[in-house]
Image: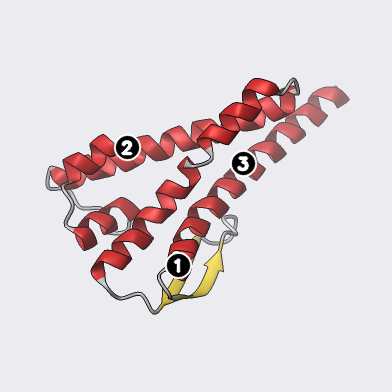
């Protein structure tokens, strides 16, 4: 019984850690792009237990730059796929494999959500708070081409 409770607790802790790391990478992507474009990050929050993860920034007002900031959030976590896959193939640790599979599943859901939002915008839908919808609005990019990219 103790082992079962311990394993369940460890599983929940690993899942929460993966969610936190994903949120950190996503919001970090936005923040990194703001800094690369010469802006200033005024608020960086990933405490998803109290508030939704978000950043606030100033100094980035050009529509193309704002489009890049919006796109950087969903794209940066996708850069974790190759190293996560490499570690997954080489590790023998079951907990590490489980954590990496959870991370890869979260990344798959990001890809599918990004494609779905882009398609939705292309079909006349509006998701004003979604990163990809903001990217499409600021950049004027073809939503179907963006969906195909994901």
- Please tell me which residue is depicted at 49% across the width and 42% down the height of the picture: 79
Q: Earlier in the sequence, mark 2 or mark 1?
A: 1
Would you identify the image quadrant in which residue 145 lies?
top left
The 10 Å Cα crowd at callout 3, few under 14, some 14 to 19, many 20 or more, is some
Q: Nearer the viewer, residue 45 or 79?
A: 79
Q: Marks 2/1: CA distance?
A: 23 Å
Q: Tell me the distance, in whole angstroms, between the alpha carbons under discs 3 and 2.
A: 22 Å
Specify which label sits upstream in the sequence, 3 or 1.
3
Judge whether residue 101 can be spotted in this image.
no
Q: Is residue 25 visible?
A: yes
Residue occupied by mark 3: 18
Drawn side of residue 113 relative to residue 64, left or right: right
Residue 26 numbered mark, or none: none
Instruction: Specify the quadrant that holds the C terminus.
Output: top left
Neighbor class of circle 1 (other Cα within 10 Å; few <14, some 14-19, many 20+) is: few
Instruction: Name the image quarter holding the N terminus.
Output: top right
Residue at screen point 18% across, 52% down? 141
Q: Nearer the viewer, mark 3 or mark 1?
A: 1
Q: Which picture quadrant has residue 4?
A: top right
Query: Do the CB atoms of the residues marked 2 and 1 lie less than 8 Å apart?
Result: no
Residue 150 vs residue 17: left or right? left
Q: Which secondary structure lies at badge 3?
A: helix
Q: Which residue is mark 1?
A: 36
Looking at marks 3 and 2 on the same chain, the residue that comes earlier in the sequence is marked by: 3
Which numbered marker is on residue 150? 2
Say which of marks 3 and 2 sits in front.
2
* x then y, percent, for residue 34: 43, 68
């Amino acid at each position: 019984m103790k082992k079962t409770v311990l394993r369940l607790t460890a599983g929940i802790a690993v899942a929460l850690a993966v969610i936190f790391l994903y949120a950190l990478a996503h919001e970090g992507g936005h923040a990194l792009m703001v800094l690369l474009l010469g802006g200033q990050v005024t608020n960086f929050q990933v405490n998803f237990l109290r508030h939704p993860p978000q950043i606030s920034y100033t100094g980035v007002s050009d529509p193309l730059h704002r489009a890049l900031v919006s796109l950087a959030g969903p794209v940066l976590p996708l850069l974790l796929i190759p190293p996560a896959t490499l570690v997954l193939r080489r590790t023998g640790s079951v907990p590490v494999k489980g954590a990496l599979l959870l991370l890869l599943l979260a990344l798959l859901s990001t890809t599918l959500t990004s494609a779905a939002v882009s398609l939705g915008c292309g079909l006349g839908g509006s998701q004003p708070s979604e990163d990809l919808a903001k990217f499409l609005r600021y950049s004027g990019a073809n939503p179907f081409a963006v969906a195909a990219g994901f």
